[in-house]
Amino acid sequence: MKKSITCTDNYEAQKLASLIYIKEDNELFINGILEIIENEIVISLKDKSAHSVLFQDRTQAEAFADFIQSVIDDVNKITKTEVFENIVEITKE
């Protein structure tokens, strides 16, 4: 399954792609979604840090949260992420 998520700009898209980073053992680096505030998501990482990402609008933020939840729950795995300008294309299986 593939999903395109639109961020506010290229910087935010690059940040999101780097936060989704897949370690060598195919483990997701994101630990969970802490909060959605308008078009911003605060993400908790496995290293206990938290980072925010700005999306184009609340709809995009909620779409990302819905899409990534099955990966956080170990139902799916991220196989690929690509950045095109301010859009992050995420593929999971």
Image (tube, rainbow, N blue to C red):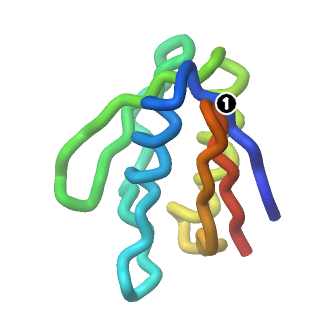
Most extreme residue toward the bottom, as rendered? 25
Which residue is at a point 41% across and 63% down the rendered structure image? 21
Dot 1 crowding, Cα within 10 Å, few <14, some 14–19, many 20+? many
Residue 26 shown left or right of residue 2 in the figure: left
Q: Quadrant of residue 38?
A: top right
Percent across and percent down for residue 15 are 40, 40
Percent across and percent down for residue 92 are 69, 68
Percent across and percent down for residue 42 are 38, 31
Q: Which residue is mark 1?
A: 6
Q: How many marks can you see?
A: 1
Is residue 25 depicted above or below 40 in this figure?
Answer: below
Is residue 76 depicted above or below 51 in this figure?
Answer: below
Is residue 41 depicted above or below 14 in this figure?
Answer: above
Which residue is at a point 41% across and 50% down the rendered structure image? 32
Is residue 73 depicted above or below 44 in this figure?
Answer: below
**Residue placed most toward the observer, 25 or 69:** 25
Task: Assign the N terminus to one quadrant of the image.
Answer: bottom right
Q: Secondary structure at mark 1?
A: strand
Most extreme residue toward the front, as rendered? 85
Which residue is at a point 56% across and 19% down the rendered structure image? 8
Percent across and percent down for residue 80 are 62, 68
Residue 69 shown left or right of residue 50 in the figure: right
Task: Assign the C terminus to one quadrant of the image.
Answer: bottom right
Which residue is at a point 46% across and 42% down the rendered structure image? 14
Residue 5 shown left or right of residue 54 in the figure: right
Most extreme residue toward the left, as rendered? 48
**Residue placed most toward the observer, 15 or 42:** 15
Most extreme residue toward the right, as rendered? 1
Q: Amino acid at mark 1?
A: Thr
